[in-house]
Image (spheres, rainbow, N blue to C red):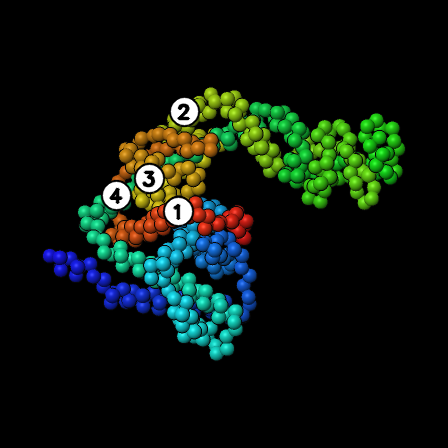
Amino acid sequence: MTTMNKKKKKLNWKKFWATVVILFVAFIFTVSIFISYSGGGGEVVEMEVIAEVNGKPVEFYANSPVVREYERLRELYKTRTKEEILSKAVQNVVASMLIEDFAKHNGLDLSEEFIDRVTADNIHSFARKTEVSSSEIKLVRLNVESYLKSSYLPTKIDTFVNRIPKKSQASLHLLKTLDDLKIAMDIINFDETEFIRLSELTDNPKGISDFYLANYKNIALDAKITIKAEKYIFGDRKSAYSFVSNGSSSFEEKSLVELDPERNKNIILGLPEDINSFSKPLFENKKYVVYKVVSIPSFESLPQKSKDYISLKHTTQNIENLMGKYSESIKDTVNTLKRYLSAGNFEGIRKIKGVKVYRTGNFSIIKALTEFIPDQKGEAIDLPRGAYNISLITSWFTKNPGDIDIADIGQGTKIIYKILNKQVIPSRLSEIVDKLFSSYQFLYQEVIYSEWNKMLEKSGNVKIKDISKFAKEL
């Protein structure tokens, strides 16, 4: 019996190397396409470092591992922001580098000589010419190294995974049964902050206008609002300060100017809080200058975009008081939405402030958790991230057609929903296997990164820079 077990556990090297060969052929095809698109111009790629792992840089450039991983994840997480996807891409690349270090310390890594040999043996066919520049060699080697590490090392890991007993057919059947169960829903996204903002615009325009006047400088800069002011020019500092204090000194020149928020930012920031006062003297072009606001556009005269910005700023800065003010109104509105939803009154729902309403297509719990909640055309519905909560989504599949419920998903947002139908719509077995495999890979990366990160947090060997800076470049 012991001998039989050893045979079962023995690694199938033929199968292993066959897999490596297939991956390598795919690699040659991929890199050749890349070279053809790059044009072989020999241009040196400027690289930035987005993170460091054990002293090794994680570079950020057009075809870097981080950017390629970002492009892959962007297709998977269509509802996430650029910054969130890039952060996940960096984590994945860091996890890959940590696995690489682990492999190196355990005799599983790729030698530099092997990478150099593969690059040298194929560089001319990749570049499709006999003379190749040093920058082209460097670029191809980076891709050779990246691809071999992303294919060879996971294949090594898979050989160990394959030694683990396979999941039973019953488990796969259970997963398929779960994926076969589909529901369709009507979903209302009720944004309480937006409800309050729109209510304040209607019910309290003076309060918003007063807020605008009290914060006119910062608002003018953010909302690109031009300010008219009188400009007084003085030859010396003493005269300027005397003028501000008691208005006794005479000025050399007085003019009416328009202060543009982009060209005159520092001047606007130097204006007085009270628009009826003089500013402190400013030193401009070897003269001392004092400003006094003549006029700013009234709130009513502003374009709608500016009004929306100011009203939102007013709402968010006073949200606690306003939540108390509108608590009963919000409660009544939620009850009205539930009543309209029960009756299928979409027209009535759309008339309510701060509301978006959607009708989904049929989807499974696996679809919702690993991809997105689709509309009737199969496109992702624009729901807040809080809606993609495993407990919330799981609860939907325990309800019956006609059931209506409400969930608070944070950030002042509620989801009010109705189950339209619940039925078994069989999926192809191959689709389930693909989903299982991709989910396994994703979770495996998550676990590896999490475990390594816990260990490395203390040693400080992983350093990740501000992701937002790099996200703006994508």
Mark carried by residue 178? 4
Residue 280 occupies quadrant:
top right
Q: Residues within 10 Å of mark 4 (few under 14, many from 20)?
A: some
* Residue 103 falls left or right of residue 465: left
Q: Which residue is mark 3?
A: 184
Q: Nearer the viewer, residue 77 or 164?
A: 164
Residue 55 higher or lower than 243, as above or below = below
| Mark 3 crowd level (few <14, some 14–19, many ≥20, 10 Å Cα) | many
* Residue at numbered disc 1: 455
Q: Is residue 436 visible?
A: yes
Q: Is residue 311 left or right of residue 28?
A: right
Q: Disc 1 versus disc 4: distance between alpha carbons?
A: 36 Å
Residue type at tag 1: Met
- Number of the label disc, if any, that sits on residue 335: 2
30 left or right of 469 in image? left
Between marks 1 and 3 in the image, the one whose residue lies nearer the viewer: 1
Front label number (1 vs 4): 1
Tag in front: 1 or 2: 1
> What is the CA distance from the residue labelled 1 to the residue labelled 2?
50 Å
**Dot 3 amino acid type:** Ala
Residue type at numbered disc 2? Asn
**Sequence-wise, which precedes: disc 1 or disc 3?**
3
Residue type, label 4 = Leu
